[in-house]
Image: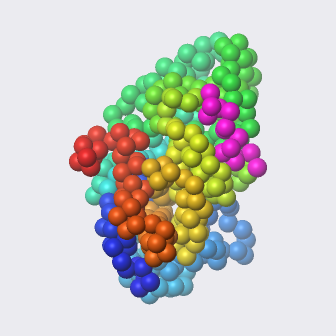
Amino acid sequence: MGGAVRGPLARELDALPLVDHHCHGVVTADLDREGFESLLTEGDPWPGVSPFDSPVGVAVRRHCAPLLDLPRHAPAEEYLARRAELGGPEVNRRFLTAAGAEVFCVDTGYAADRLTTPEELAGTAGGKAYEVVRLEGVAEAVAAAGVEPDAYAEAFLAAAHRAVGRPGVVAVKSVAAYRTGFDLDPARPSDAEVTEAARHWLARGGRLDDPVLMRHLLWTAVGLGLPLQLHTGFGDSDIRMHRVDPTHLTDWLHLTAGTVPVLLLHCWPYQRQAAYLAAVFEQVYLDVGLTLHHVGPARAAAVLAEALEITPFRKLLYSSDAYGIAEFHHLGALAFRQGLAGLLQERVDADELGLPDALRIARWAGRDNALRVYRLPNLLAENG
């Protein structure tokens, strides 16, 4: 870390074994330039415009190059050549161990065949792995196996119970933000509504994007009893940004009060709206994962400052939401550590926060809040 932040807060966060409560595996195969750049952006690479020429690309060259034995700000060509020289397994080992995460809660629901398994990811990092089940994938597998419309609800529920009953599963996730947005009727749909919607969806096939069935999925998730992760805000071009403001969930959160924890992921540019929900609903938590490595350490404190304006300190969690390239595991952790240390140190220096409180907040956000919400075995006992 830089010389500006080297006090006890920086040392605390540097040494803290993080709980990455939402992430994905990494690619094990060697990547050429096209393959690497396709994973460096949430969009599609454009002719003549390199993702290296973006905030996240600059952050990779600045903060990841030294771990490949390159100078800071190494040109993209040199960076990729050195990455290829070392090979995928060694690159992954360097970045995953540098991230300093002890626990990974891994979403296995997207292109899992291309990526490390949770066990492989954690093994490379020297940590522990748990699984997050993506419920849209469960529903789509039920449809692919063949089911009658009037049997869909029962078949989906049974499949969901089987999925969450696997060893190591600690949460479920929905990507409703990508499929329908959140401006849905908050009420639980009737059996007749589910059957009719299933009739249309099963006839046409494809991804689950029916609003009634998405409502049914969210209500089914509540009944499973595990923490529910919801993507909000920033994502790829499937997102319709005005429809993924998490405050669209307000009425649904009223109806589901007292049930399961709801974890709002990413949140940018709606981190303030997510903070409001965390401040007024007991079951709501948030992170700014994915956002932090895309804005880089230079802007991480600013994003975290907005997220923490009104968020109760037991409600902020750390996640990298790293996918595909191990650089994002390292960069997300670095941005979080530096950003939170700088933000809290600024408040301590202004006498707006006592140092013991700041140290406790740092531990809560980086580790303890996730241990408590996910009721992680062994680690929770170790943490008291």
Q: Is residue 60 above or below residue 211?
A: below
Where is residue 382? Give x, y as percent. Answer: 23, 48
Where is residue 161? Give x, y as percent. Answer: 45, 24
Which image quarter: residue 271? bottom right
Q: Residue furthest front?
A: 351
Q: Residue furthest bottom?
A: 71
Residue 367 versus residue 237: which sits nearer the camera? 367
Where is residue 347? Give x, y as percent. Answer: 49, 70
Q: How is the image coloured?
A: rainbow
How many dots with numbers? 0
Residue 353 versus residue 110: which sits nearer the camera? 353
Q: Is residue 174 visible?
A: yes
Q: Is residue 47 left or right of residue 129?
A: right
Q: Is residue 359 left or right of residue 155?
A: left
Q: Is residue 264 visible?
A: no
Residue 67 versus residue 35: which sits nearer the camera? 67
Residue 320 versus residue 348: which sits nearer the camera? 348
Main SS of the magenta part reads helix
Picture quarter with the N terminus: bottom left
Q: Is residue 381 left or right of residue 57?
A: left
Where is residue 330? Give x, y as percent. Answer: 43, 67
Write the residue at 57% across / 55% down: 310
Write the residue at 68% across / 20% down: 189
Q: Which residues are magenta?
A: 242-255
Q: Is residue 76 above or below residue 334?
A: below
Is residue 318 located in the magenta-colored stretch of the structure? no
Is residue 245 located in the magenta-colored stretch of the structure? yes
Write the residue at 36% across / 77% down: 7
Write the residue at 36% across / 51% down: 368
Which image quarter: residue 163? top left
